Image: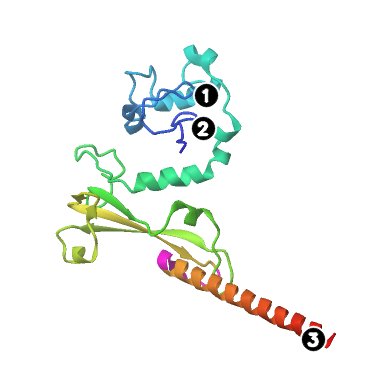
């Protein structure tokens, strides 16, 4: 599975933060630069934010590496990696996101109640979000929506939520993220499990109708032969 380069935006890496070098912009992917885009020093001579500006200006993360940069291949372009984009997205939000309590610049530290972790509850694979879904009532195209709620592990409503994640348990304020689909015309919302059930029933009904039509066609064909 290809991963997106944080500097040029092309899918040239095969694993995030694996100390790999992008051949398009010559950026050395490292966990330190991903966590802090303003960090300068170490493997890369410039910060990630400066490298992005340099790539837009002259096609490389630094002037000294212009001669080593090469154009991306067609399979590395962002428009040809839409499915990899969803896979990387769900892999990222499925992990626990923690932050330093003294770092008030982090987006999670600025949320009300100081969120210590994020857990995404997804009842489907990434392909389910990639395809279009229609409303069972009016046949309009459904739009994906996100629902977020911060729950404390020691509160009374914590018994209605699952704080376990792999082999650990989340503590403190946890933001639970769930997704659902909504119809823009009839203003009806569908949970993922409900939508999957309705689509499955609709497919089964269509198959039954097709089988019935084939049986009727065979009977009509047999009667025509008997008359002859």
Secondary structure beneath dot 2 equals loop
Question: Height in image: 116 above or below 21?
Answer: below
Which residue is the site of mark 3? 226
Quarter of the view holding residue 220: bottom right
Looking at the image, do the residues carrying marks 2 and 1 touch, with CB atoms under 8 Å apart?
Answer: yes
Secondary structure beneath dot 1 equals loop
Which residue is the site of mark 2? 10
Residue 37 picture location, percent across and down: 36, 30
Residue 199 picture location, percent across and down: 51, 69
**Measured Cα–Cα span from mark 1 to mark 3:** 72 Å
Which residue is the site of mark 1? 24
Of badges 2 and 3, nearer the viewer stands 3
For marks 2 and 1, the one nearer the N-term is 2
Secondary structure beneath dot 3 equals helix
Give the magenta range.
185-193
**Measured Cα–Cα span from mark 2 to mark 1:** 8 Å
Q: Residue furthest left?
A: 154
For marks 1 and 3, the one nearer the N-term is 1
């Amino acid at each position: 599975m290809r991963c997106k380069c944080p500097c040029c935006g092309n899918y040239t890496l095969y694993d995030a933060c694996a100390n790999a070098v992008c051949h398009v912009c010559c950026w050395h992917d490292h966990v330190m630069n991903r966590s802090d885009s303003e960090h300068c020093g170490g493997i890369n001579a410039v910060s990630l934010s400066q490298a992005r500006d340099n790539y837009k200006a002259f096609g490389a993360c630094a002037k000294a590496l212009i001669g080593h940069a090469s154009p991306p291949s067609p399979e590395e372009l962002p428009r040809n990696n839409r499915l990899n984009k969803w896979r990387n997205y769900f892999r990222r939000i499925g992990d626990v996101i923690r932050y330093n309590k003294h770092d008030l610049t982090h987006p999670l530290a600025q949320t009300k109640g100081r969120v210590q972790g994020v857990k995404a509850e997804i009842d489907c694979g990434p392909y389910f979000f990639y395809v279009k879904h229609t409303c069972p009532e009016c046949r309009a195209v459904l739009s994906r929506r996100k629902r977020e709620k911060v729950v404390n592990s020691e509160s009374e409503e914590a018994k209605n939520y699952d704080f376990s994640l792999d082999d650990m348990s989340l503590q403190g304020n946890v933001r639970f993220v769930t997704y659902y689909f909504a119809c823009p015309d009839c203003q009806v919302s569908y949970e993922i499990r409900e939508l999957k059930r309705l689509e499955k029933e609709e497919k089964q009904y269509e198959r039954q109708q097709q089988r019935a039509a084939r049986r009727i066609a065979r009977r009509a064909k047999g009667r025509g032969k008997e008359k002859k």
